Amino acid sequence: MSERTPEPRARRRGRPGYDQETVLRRAIDLFNRQGYEATSVGDIAAELGLVKSAIYHHVPSKEHLLAAALDEALDGLSAAIDAATQRHGGAPAYDRLVAVVRESVQILAAHQPAVTLLLRVRGNSEVEQAALKRRREIDDKLATLVAEAAEEGYVRSDIPADLASRLLFGMVNSLIEWYRPDGPLGVDELADQVVEMAFEGLRTPPLRPGR
């Protein structure tokens, strides 16, 4: 008596499968569109086509998603500034400062939604307060680097270092308002132009004698 080959079972239809990275990406987009406070776990579930309870199979809370997004934005900046302030290779502070500005542009372009969310936090929760504390620490380290470059004579010393650092990061952060990675301006070219503007300004080169 031959054994019957079992018929294939019909595939069960259940909730769509998402990994945590996809859930985070969609949540960040929703936070940026609606605002974090105005977005509920139910909204995130609806965005993914899930029932609300299914979200908790992926993440423990909405705050967990916010913390992950803010860490994403801050980790790259922290690494860049830490590397610059450790005086690797004995490079002048000016060279390290330029490298930080250039890398900050690249980090913003690579993580634009997360950086956008970071720039909108106001300290309304412990998660946001922790992110703002990390931002202040980055600002302080950049100001120290500006001060070192001024002591070396590479940048102006008549502008307070903390003001100069805020202006530098302000220029970089403003890119979230208009830069599009799929646009005609590549990120390397953008970084070069930001560095040129930050350290050379709009002043034209001096005219040669006789002109």
Image: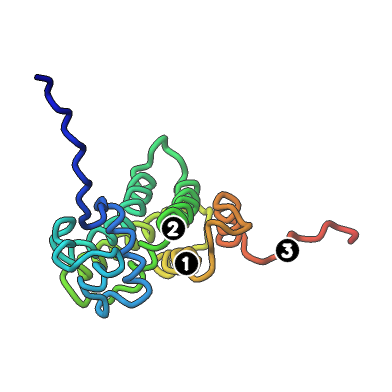
Question: Dot 1: within a 10 Å radius of its alpha carbon, few (fewer than 14), some, or many (20 or more) residues?
Answer: some
> In the image as oriented, which residue stretches furthest toward the top?
1
In the image, residue 29 sits, relative to residue 81, either above or below, namely below
Residue at which label 3 appears: 204
Q: Which residue is mark 2?
A: 108
- Amino acid marked by disc 1: Ile
Q: Residue at x 26, y 56 (%)?
A: 16
Q: Position of residue 41 (x, y in %)?
A: 20, 71
Q: Is residue 28 left or right of residue 156?
A: left
Q: Mark 3 and mark 2 in contact? Answer it, CB < 8 Å.
A: no
Measured as percent of width and height from the top left, residue 7 is found at: 19, 36
The mark that comes first in sequence, 3 or 1, is 1
Residue 198 image-quadrant placement: bottom right
Instruction: State the residue position of label 1.
Output: 176
Contact, CB < 8 Å: mark 2 with mark 1? yes
Residue found at the far front of this picture: 1
Residue 31 drawn above or below residue 10: below
Packing grade of label 2 (10 A; few <14, some 14-19, many >=20) is: many
State which mark lies toward you, 3 or 1. Answer: 1
Cβ atoms at labels 3 and 1 below 8 Å apart: no
The foreground one among 186 and 21 is 21
Locate residue 190: give its quadrant: bottom right
Name the residue: 36% across, 44% down: 83
Decide which of tag 3 and tag 2 comes sooner along the chain: 2
Residue 162 position within the rendered picture, expressed as x and y whole percent measured from the top left = 39, 67
